[in-house]
Image (cartoon, grey):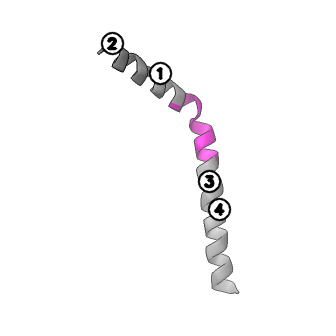
């Protein structure tokens, strides 16, 4: 049980530290999809 709690704390710390990088990736993916959709609508 102790190892499960320790690994959970480690994963939550890792997620908190890399949250901004995850958001950058999601933002870029959304921008690419939106650009593709608008390009298909107007061309």
Q: Earlier in the sequence, mark 2 or mark 4?
A: 2
Picture disc at residue 10: 1
Dot 2 crowding, Cα within 10 Å, few <14, some 14–19, many 20+: few
Residue under pointer 4: 31
Residue at which label 3 appears: 27
For mark 2, give the secondary structure. Answer: helix
| Of marks 3 and 1, the one in the foreground | 1
x 70%, y 87%: residue: 43
Instruction: Choose top left, top right, bottom left or bottom right for residue 42.
Output: bottom right
On the image, numbered disc 2 is attached to which residue? Answer: 2
Give the left or right position of residue 38, taking residue 6 as reference: right
In this view, the mark in front (2 or 4) = 2
Q: Residue at x 50, y 24 (%)?
A: 13
C-alpha gap between disc 2 and disc 4 = 42 Å
Q: Which residue range is magenta in the image?
A: 15-24
Task: Identify the mark nearer the N-term, 3 or 1.
Answer: 1
């Amino acid at each position: 049980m102790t190892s499960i709690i320790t690994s959970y704390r480690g994963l939550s710390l890792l997620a908190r530290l890399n949250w901004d990088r995850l958001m950058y990736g999601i933002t870029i993916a959304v921008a690419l999809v939106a650009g593709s959709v608008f390009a298909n609508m107007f061309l």
